[in-house]
């Protein structure tokens, strides 16, 4: 299965460049980890939305909603996760990786509550494999 991390990062801090964790490195790791995995025919590509903004800032109104979207024609699935600049600004790389793992894992779990969800997609196995991959990455990254 293909993996991609879509990034939305607001610039709400003067030195707010998010470079503590290399999302390109994480994405490359996940691409390699999941390249040979198959979770069913309904989803062939999974997009994680990484939304980093101040929860109490001016952009919060545009990013506060959870998204689960399944594109049946392309067999792409999109889910997002929210991250708070106010929290990230004080964390080290290991702490941030742990939060990314937790929030992306939760975003996969939201599939269970969708009204119209992929019929042939073992999202629970994907969620388990994702957690394991992120635990491994924590030691690599």
Image (cartoon, rainbow, N blue to C red):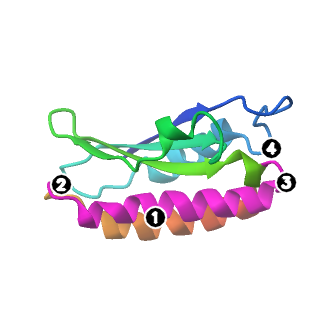
Q: Which mark is residue 89?
A: none
Nearer to the camera, 54 or 21: 54
Decide: few, some or many residues near mark 4? Use Cα within 10 Å; few <14, some 14-19, many ≥20.
Answer: some
Residue for badge 3:
90
Disc with the residue nearer the chain's start (1 vs 4): 4
The Cα atoms of the two marked residues, 1 and 4, are separated by 22 Å
Q: Is residue 5 visible?
A: no
Residue 57, quarter of picture? top right
Task: Determine the residue positioned at 52% across, 67% down.
Answer: 131
Residue for badge 4:
20
- Magenta run includes residue 76: no
Mark 3 vs mark 1: give the one in front. 3
Question: Regarding mark 3 in the picture, which secondary structure is present there?
Answer: loop
The Cα atoms of the two marked residues, 2 and 4, are separated by 35 Å
Q: Position of residue 130 (x, y in %)?
A: 48, 62
Q: Position of residue 117 (x, y in %)?
A: 18, 56
Question: Regarding mark 2 in the picture, which secondary structure is present there?
Answer: loop
Mark 3 vs mark 4: give the one in front. 3
Disc with the residue nearer the chain's start (1 vs 2): 1
Question: Regarding mark 1 in the picture, which secondary structure is present there?
Answer: helix
Q: Which mark is residue 118?
A: 2
Disc with the residue nearer the chain's start (3 vs 2): 3
Disc with the residue nearer the chain's start (3 vs 4): 4
Nearer to the camera, 118 or 51: 51
The Cα atoms of the two marked residues, 3 and 2, are separated by 38 Å
Decide: few, some or many residues near mark 1? Use Cα within 10 Å; few <14, some 14-19, many ≥20.
Answer: some
Residue for badge 1:
106
Question: Regarding mark 4 in the picture, which secondary structure is present there?
Answer: loop
- Magenta region: 89-118
The Cα atoms of the two marked residues, 1 and 2, are separated by 17 Å
């Amino acid at each position: 299965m293909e993996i991609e991390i879509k990034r939305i990062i607001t610039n709400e801090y003067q030195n707010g460049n998010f470079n503590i964790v290399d999302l390109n490195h994480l994405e490359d790791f996940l691409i390699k980890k999941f390249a040979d995995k198959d979770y069913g025919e309904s989803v062939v590509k999974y997009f994680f939305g990484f939304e980093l903004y101040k929860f109490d800032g001016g952009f919060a109104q545009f990013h506060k909603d959870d998204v689960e979207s399944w594109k049946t024609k392309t067999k792409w699935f999109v889910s997002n996760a929210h991250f708070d600049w106010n929290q990230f600004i004080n964390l080290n790389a290991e702490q941030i990786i742990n939060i990314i793992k937790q929030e992306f894992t939760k975003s996969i779990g939201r599939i269970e509550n969708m009204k119209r969800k992929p019929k042939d997609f073992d999202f629970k196995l994907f969620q388990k494999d994702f957690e394991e991959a992120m635990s491994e990455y924590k030691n690599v990254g």
